Image (cartoon, helix red, strand yellow):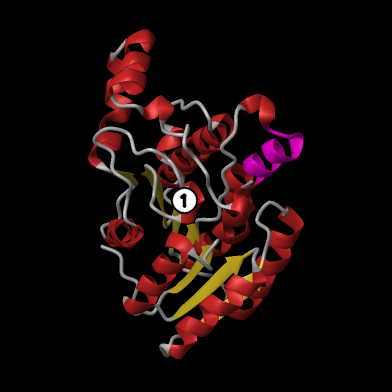
Amino acid sequence: MSSFKNKIVLITGGASGIGYLMGEKSLQREARKLIIWDINEDKLLDAAKRLSKQGYTVETGVVDVSDPEQVQQEAKKVLDEHGSIDMLFNNAGIVVGKKFEEHSIEHIKKTMDINSLGLMYVARAFLPAMIENGYGYIINIASAAGLTPNPGMTVYAASKWAAVGWSESLNLELKKNGEPVNVLTVMPSYINTGMFAGVTAPLLMPLLDPDDISTKILDAVEREKERLREPFMVKLTPFIRGILPAKLYDFVAGKIFGVYDSMNTFIGRKTDH
């Protein structure tokens, strides 16, 4: 079992949404300090202010995780002050819900840079210190989109497939080498936040409540789980996709469960476009 008590927790994309909730809940579980990284300075300052009013110790950094030099610079500041961090929540992410031919090159690059490479940049910056310190936990917020194809989110799905593959491979690598760092790969379906505003929830896969899923993520950390897939049907996705022929799986996912039409009504945040 792991505990948040007296831990230093860093969360990327932590100024809003489930990032903010995971930070707040970490402090409620007696984390010693929360470090929030976010690209939006106004939201970052507001989040820190709200948490500080509750008596918590919070540090902030305006960081674009898609910029490796910026990540290294900000990570160095954290490491110089604290030596290491205990828990890293790789939570920053974006989505562009358009047909692939409507994506600009900038859309494609930014999505892959933030959702895939950003996780690697941040983890790489802190992992050596975690290993040297003898403890660490890396929580990668991926997506159920990393388990199944989905029209309307081609590049997003690609970025999350990469995130899942890297995260689970990193977990196996660290275990194989006997390193004292755990990795949790989180693969939720649509979460009811502004990021996926307007989506149509597939059959048997209701929109996830932000408060509920953030609690489940922290519970999974305390239980030292390696994977978290929510809701229940997402747990079955790899099995169903593995046993069904491709055309039959597409029929089940598309025509019966409505997964392939779920982005038809997508609106999203303006900043995600």
Q: Is residue 155 left or right of residue 185?
A: right
Which residue sits at x=32%, y=50%? 208
Q: Does the stretch in magenta take in 175?
A: no
Viewer can see residue 10:
yes
Please indicate, yes or no, whether residue 79 appears anywhere in the rendered image.
no
Sort mark 1 into few (<14), some (14-19) or many (20+) by Cα contacts within 10 Å: many
Residue 158 lies, in percent from the top left, at: 55, 31
Dominant secondary structure of the residues highlighted in magenta in the image? helix
- Residue 248 place in picture, x, y as percent: 32, 10
Q: Position of residue 37 (x, y in %)?
A: 59, 67
Q: Position of residue 160 (x, y in %)?
A: 51, 38
In this picture, residue 198 sits left or right of residue 5: right
Which amino acid type corresponds to the residue marked 1 in the rendered image?
Asn
Q: Quadrant of residue 262?
A: top left
Q: In the rendered view, tell whether residue 52 sits above or below residue 98.
A: below
Is label 1 in a helix, a strand or a loop? strand
Identify residue for label 1. 140
* Up-down relation of residue 269 to residue 47 (above or below): above
Give the image quarter of residue 74: bottom right
Give the residues in magenta.
Answer: 103-113
In front here: 159 or 156? 156
Asked if residue 35 is positioned above or below residue 134 in the image, the reply reads below
Query: Which residue is found at the position 28% from the left and 43% from the top?
Result: 206
Residue at 68% in and 74% down: 77
The answer to whether 110 is drawn above or below residue 135 in the figure is above
- Residue 105 in magenta stretch: yes
